[in-house]
Amino acid sequence: MYESQVIDDLEVVVIGAGIAGLAAATTLHGSGVKNIAILEAQPEPGGRIKSVQFGSGFVDLGAQWFHGTKNDLCQIAKENGFLHSTNSFEGLGNYYSSGGKVVSAKVVDNVSNVIAEALSKLENITSEDDIPDSVGEYLTNEFETYINKICDTEENIKLKRQVFDWHLRFQVIDNACTDLWTLSAKYFGKYQFCGGDDYVNLKCGFSKVIDHLASELPPGILRTSCPVKVIKWKKRDSHSSKDICEIVTENGDIFHCEHVMVTCSVGFLKENWSMFDPPLPLSYLKGFNCIGFDTLNKVYLEYDECWWGSLEGIQFVWDSAKRKKMLEGDDTLWTCDLTGFDPVVGLPNVLVGWVGGEGAVLMEAFSADLIGQHCTQVLREITGNTEIPIPKRCTRCCEEEMATSPLACSIDNDTSNRALAVIGSP
């Protein structure tokens, strides 16, 4: 029988051993703060970062790339030989409309250039009067302005609208939102690329970085399978000890400390405000509730052979609204929010597809086997190749199903990949 413990006189307790929590603890320890504990609810550190062995290599069910190499974390990966020599890419290859028709490169490039220019302009808008209500509204207006100016065939205009639809799906995934009409145009340009290469892969998955950071910490600091139940703030008076916070875990352990750093995901915090006693100030809650990060899913498909040959991608071009109406009530409705499939660096027989918006939620109702079949159905339809095989094996973030089903798919189900650190004091 487990006996609960009381741990006193800690300087800092870090809640969450994802990348934010490990980075916080590493920084604190390197700065001379030695009396630290990290409490992680899961059996292993990593949070939304999880790599699994798949086929002849590894795939990431969560974070997958370094976007930019001029940062400390990427430097750590480089110094330890974790980086892959080949970078990835998205949105390349053939853009298929139904029945295996390949959209001409000229049409694809025309629309891509319109979107790239529009996003660049949006990032650099400075006047409050010029800021549109949403990214969706802005992109639509810019695209319609382009369409109204050009002289083109009816067929090409139809195709350009469908390629534009692909870009809307891509931006939903890239920004992890339900739709672009809820994505702030005002703050769209606040993201800053750190510079260097983009879409940088890791040889054995992102978990290698997690393992390295965890290994750099002294033994005993990291406590896994230790979910926090409540964080109780105490008022310090002249007769009390220096401890001003009590953390109670689900297994009954109690930690007393001076400071708490909460690095849980935004999605988790929104559902667990009750863990703070007394409650956080209303201004905190309002601030967090203005931050959105919706469901984003990922599907990996492994085959015996690389049936797509040298193609750098298979992109799905359609009118999502019409397709969703056509498939209303059908199990494959979720596939309307797929952008397509791309090859995976280092795994020549594997494809990865991303799905956002409503489809990312809908797909969670289906088994791995069914999702694999749905993907095959769409791939056959869009490419016109009825001989595309059912995938040999897939993987998904649901560990129970991943362990029991030989035919699965990989789903990165995460309502908040971006961790925030809240530095607490009463």
Image (cartoon, grey):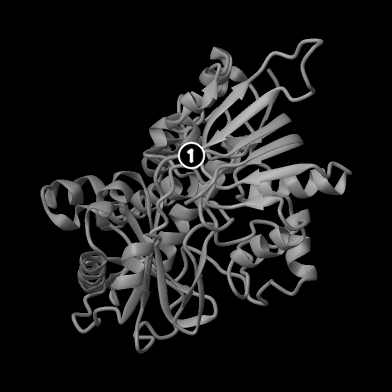
Does residue 116 show up? yes
Q: Residue furthest top?
A: 238
Tell me: residue 91, above or below residue 272: below
Tell me: residue 245, above or below residue 38: above
73 relative position to 304: left or right: right
Q: Residue at x 57, y 39 (%)?
A: 253
Q: Nearer the viewer, residue 399 or 72?
A: 399
8 relative position to 88: left or right: right
Tag 1's secondary structure?
Answer: loop
Q: Amino acid at mark 1?
A: Glu
Q: Nearer the viewer, residue 4 or 45?
A: 4
Q: How many marks?
A: 1
Tell me: residue 61, above or below residue 294: below
Tell me: residue 141, above or below residue 315: above
Disc 1: which residue: 250
Mark 1 Cα-neighbour bin, 10 Å: few <14, some 14–19, many ≥20? few
Q: Position of residue 163 (x, y in %)?
A: 36, 55
Q: Residue at x 22, y 58 (%)?
A: 366
Among the 4 quarters of the image, the one containing residue 287: top right
Among the 4 quarters of the image, the one containing residue 139: top left
250 relative position to 259: left or right: left
Q: Nearer the viewer, residue 31 or 144?
A: 31
Among the 4 quarters of the image, the one containing residue 294: top left
Q: Nearer the viewer, residue 226 or 183?
A: 226
Q: Position of residue 314 (x, y in %)?
A: 37, 70
Q: Position of residue 322 (x, y in %)?
A: 18, 47
Q: Residue at x 50, y 30 (%)?
A: 184
51 relative position to 406: left or right: right
Q: Position of residue 367 (x, y in %)?
A: 23, 62
Does residue 103 show up? no
Q: Quadrant of the C terminus?
A: top right
Q: Residue furthest right?
A: 32
